[in-house]
Image (cartoon, helix red, strand yellow):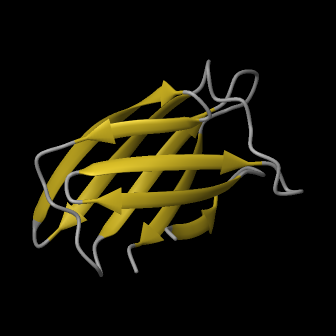
Amino acid sequence: GGTVGETSGHHHVELVTEGQSMTLYVAHDDGELEKVADAKATATILSGGKTEKIVLMPNGEVLKGEGSITVEKGDTIVITLTMPGHKPEQARLKVN
């Protein structure tokens, strides 16, 4: 039920936003969820001329974070994801 995209590497991501919190799901090409326990990620929110960078922390099978900006439809979020053993990857998502 979130915004889906691909990183500049080979991962598929789905970002679910609810108010000021967000949950990032990371999957392989085959759709299987990646283990994110050692992953690092940030989400940079671009909303109505405001910018906020949020650290997304591992939480079970997902990465979660919360900021001060309420994410709304049409906002752009730039995800920077570093999986263990991989170079940093980026995905630019438009919230739908």
Is 33 above or below relative to 51? above
Is 4 above or below relative to 59? below
Q: What is the x, y in percent for residue 46?
A: 23, 63
Asked whether 63 or 6 is in front, the reply is 63
Q: What is the x, y in percent for residue 8?
A: 66, 55
Image quarter for residue 57? top left
For the point 70% across and 22% down, the residue is 84
On the picture, is 50 further left or further right than 24?
A: left
Q: What is the x, y in percent for residue 82?
A: 60, 32
**How many callouts does the rendering have?**
0
Is 12 above or below relative to 58? below
On the picture, is 86 further left or further right than 29?
A: left
Is 82 above or below relative to 43? above
For the C terminus, the image quarter is bottom left
On the picture, is 74 further left or further right than 38?
A: left
Asked whether 38 or 23 is in front, the reply is 23
Image quarter for residue 71? bottom left
On the picture, is 24 further left or further right than 34?
A: left
Asked whether 86 or 40 is in front, the reply is 40
